[in-house]
């Protein structure tokens, strides 16, 4: 049995709440130097980026010492560096702490704020912002919400406990309830349970339903509706039994009532540009319920947010 490689602690501190990048050099390869491997591996970073980082001493080994530009390639070696932080448009909405103890932090995330650093969203993420605002660098996300979805998120405080909380979501031991505003169709029989197979391909914005064994299950209920004269919309309770990417958005679209403000379903209009906060996706992670795997406490959390298209459709439609 192959022994699991021990990952040494990072010799670099976080920057703006963002962890440094860790790279493990491959066990096998024809590179003569660390530089050669990094230039190949980070080819998308741009010409000269690796050379500039090495010359400035920004790439370090496990001992915290700078890796020399001509350092020999050592199979299995770990190196760390900070990525260049992009200029980001600040998401001008608060990240509200709902609950906090020595083990977890539960927050009510606004629309447009990504959960964790990825792609062009790095410092303007719930994780990085929380680390900065709370002064807790060990915070980690136990699960994720789409950037466009608002609502409840669970973060862990202690690295050694993270796996126990992530297992709650992996093993479906968390009851999650969402709320959405979408068109009202009097011919649509609800409540119902929607089952389908959803696939999401890397590099493709929208997920899609395909033939095959269902891997996505959602309960859809109509809570109330308003007349056609008043935009003909409904307020829905959505209870996912699984966690496929965009599952609720795909299922609502398949029922003929796509969630208001969705830039992907039924028609892909592209990702919402940074700085465009006018018409948020009307989807909210309303509640989380679970038994704490560390303390045994029964937790029930509920978002206090209101979906704007339900309270003031005209204002939401006008991007106000």
Image (cartoon, rainbow, N blue to C red):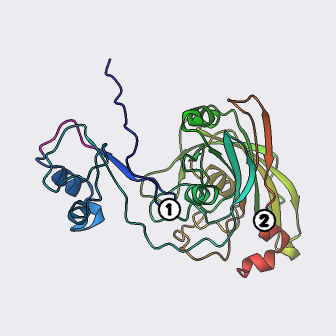
> Which residue is depicted at the point 10% across and 47% down?
32
Left or right side of 128 for 8: left
Q: Residue at x 60, y 63 (%)?
A: 113
Left or right of 110, for residue 18: left
Looking at the rendered structure, the secondary structure element under dot 2 is loop
Disc ID at residue 123: none
In the rendering, which numbered label is found on residue 307? 2
Percent of width and height locating residue 73? 16, 44
Instruction: Between residue 187 and residue 73, name the one nearer to us.
Output: 73
The residue positioned farthest toward the top in the image shown: 1
Q: Position of residue 67 (x, y in %)?
A: 22, 52
Who comes first in sequence, dot 2 or dot 1? 1
- Give the label, 2 or 1, closer to the camera: 1
Q: Position of residue 8 (x, y in %)?
A: 37, 37
Is residue 38 positioned above or below 240 on the image?
below
Going by the image, does 147 lie left or right of 301? left
Magenta residues span 24-30
Residue that badge 1 annotates: 16
Circle 1 Cα neighbour tier, 10 Å, few/some/many (<14 / 14–19 / ≥20): some
Disc 2 vs disc 1: Cβ atoms closer than 8 Å?
Answer: no
Q: Quadrant of residue 101?
A: top right
Q: Is residue 253 above or below residue 63?
A: below
**Which residue does the image show at 20% across and 38% down from the upper left?**
75
């Amino acid at each position: 049995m192959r022994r699991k490689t021990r990952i040494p602690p990072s010799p670099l501190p976080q920057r703006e709440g963002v962890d440094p990048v860790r790279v493990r050099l491959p066990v096998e390869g024809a590179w003569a130097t660390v530089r050669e491997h990094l230039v190949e591996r980070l080819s998308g970073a741009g010409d000269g980026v690796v050379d500039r980082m090495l010359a400035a001493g920004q790439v370090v080994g496990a001992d915290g010492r700078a890796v020399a530009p001509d350092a020999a390639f050592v199979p299995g070696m770990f190196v760390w560096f900070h990525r260049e932080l992009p200029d980001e448009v600040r998401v001008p909405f608060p990240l509200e702490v709902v609950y906090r103890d020595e083990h977890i932090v539960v927050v009510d995330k606004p629309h447009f704020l990504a959960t964790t650093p990825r792609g062009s969203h790095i410092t303007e993420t719930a994780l990085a912002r929380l680390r900065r605002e709370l002064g807790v660098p060990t915070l980690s996300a136990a699960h994720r919400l789409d950037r466009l979805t608002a609502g409840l998120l669970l973060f862990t405080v202690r690295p050694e406990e993270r796996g126990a909380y992530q297992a709650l979501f992996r093993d479906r031991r968390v009851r999650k309830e969402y709320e959405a505003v979408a068109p009202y169709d009097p011919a649509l029989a609800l409540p119902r349970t929607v089952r389908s197979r959803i696939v999401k391909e890397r590099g493709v914005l929208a997920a899609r339903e395909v033939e095959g064994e269902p891997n996505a299950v959602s309960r859809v209920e109509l809570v109330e509706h308003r007349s056609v004269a008043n935009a003909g919309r409904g307020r829905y309770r959505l209870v996912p039994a699984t966690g496929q990417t965009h599952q609720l958005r795909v299922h609502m679209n398949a029922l003929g009532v796509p969630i208001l403000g969705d830039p992907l379903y039924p028609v892909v209009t592209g990702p919402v540009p940074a700085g465009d906060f006018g018409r948020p996706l009307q989807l909210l992670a309303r509640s989380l319920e679970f038994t704490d795997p560390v303390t045994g406490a029964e937790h029930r959390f509920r978002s206090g947010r209101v979906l704007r298209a339900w309270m003031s459709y005209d204002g939401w439609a006008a991007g106000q």
